[in-house]
Image (tube, rainbow, N blue to C red):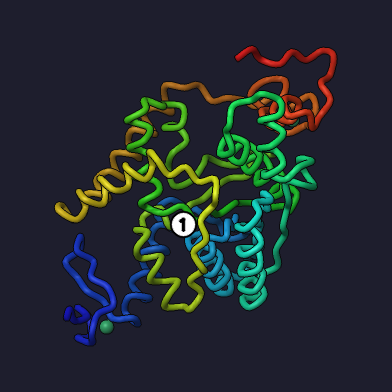
Amino acid sequence: MAKCSVCGKPAVYVAKYEGKAYCADHFLKWFDKRVRKTIRKYRMFGPKEHIVVAVSGGKDSLAALHYMSRLSKRVPGWTVEALLIDEGIEGYRPITIRDFKRWAEEWGVSYRIVSFKEEIGASLDEIIKLGLEKGLPYQPCTYCGVFRRYLLNKAAREMDATVLVTGHNLDDEVQTFMMNILRHDMDRMSRLGPTTDAGTEYFVRRAKIFYEIPEKEIVIYSMLHGFFPEFVECPYARLGFRWDVRHYINLLEERYPGIKYNILKSALDVSQAVRKTRPPQHPQLCKICGEPSKGPVCRACELRIMLGLLEKPDWFELPKK
Ligand SMILES: [Zn+2]
Ligand SMILES: [Zn+2]
């Protein structure tokens, strides 16, 4: 059995890419040191911040909330709140919401829950039915993604967030980078990275505090702190492509420890280079809801019109597919 490289006690984790092992105590110290290093390196926070953590109910975002709620106690100018988007997925959401509330209360973090039902006019389950009735393609993850992004930004802004923290980790980032390469999706490529540039009055700045932390280590962090959530999988998850990419990257990491960090460096360079080739987009405001948008009507309103949840204004033509 491996022994802790610091104190010689039995190790709970071996970091192959570093050639070191850690006992529970030294793992947590090492974890903390690395997250703080990431935060400093990418200048994620200033001396005064109202930090909103986007919680999905999974281990990564719960760990981000746990971490930020503790760290903020040491920084007088920081306040932390949590934001959960309730898509309305039967058999999945109720369990994660119950767990989330329990932990938030235990950690003394106030929170806001925003639901698709109230804000969009229908739950995700209902939206999917409506879509099929209207003859739209079966695309649960598109609806979910568009409305989630929309509501996260809107709600975080309403909460006066100066920064929105998400639980994305090293593995997520590396997988997304490889998927963008394999699909040649340079639009998405330009959005990768540990933070988004300075927020605007429309967009809340984003920060990924676990940008350099492997998924496995977040699992251990959660377990050592005793809040590892019950694993419930989203019934709409189509793991297909990401699942395969994840599998091959893990295989490579097993054979060539440290390869994920090399991919991460490539991702950072490539996304910065791609961004330079694209002029910054100044968002317009959606003529229907007033939220930031690429065109005169935002994607969320467009989808709501297509689903019959919003009346189509006379001046607006739906894009032809
Ligand atoms: Zn130790
Ligand atoms: Zn809109």
> Which of 281/169 is in front?
169
Picture quarter containing residue 25? bottom left
Q: Residues within 10 Å of mark 1 (few under 14, many from 20)?
A: many
Amino acid bearing label 1: Ile
Q: Quadrant of ligand 1?
A: bottom left
What residue sits right under mark 1 in the picture? 209
Q: Is residue 206 left or right of residue 122?
A: left
Q: Is residue 24 above or below residue 207?
A: below
How many marks can you see? Answer: 1
Q: Position of residue 44 (x, y in %)?
A: 50, 53
> Which of 287/240 is in front?
240
Q: Is residue 100 left or right of residue 17?
A: right
Residue at figure coordinates x 37%, y 75% from the top left: 28
Residue at figure coordinates x 27%, y 43% from the top left: 263
Q: Is residue 108 left or right of residue 42?
A: right
> Which of 77/218 is in front?
218
The reply to whether residue 176 is in sight is no
Q: Is residue 134 above or below residue 242?
A: above
The reply to whether residue 244 is in sight is yes
Mark 1, secondary structure of its residue: strand
- Quarter of the picture containing the N terminus is bottom left
Q: Position of residue 47 (x, y in %)?
A: 57, 60
Q: Report whether the residue tagged 1 is closer than 8 Å to ligand 1.
A: no
Residue at figure coordinates x 24%, y 80% from the top left: 11
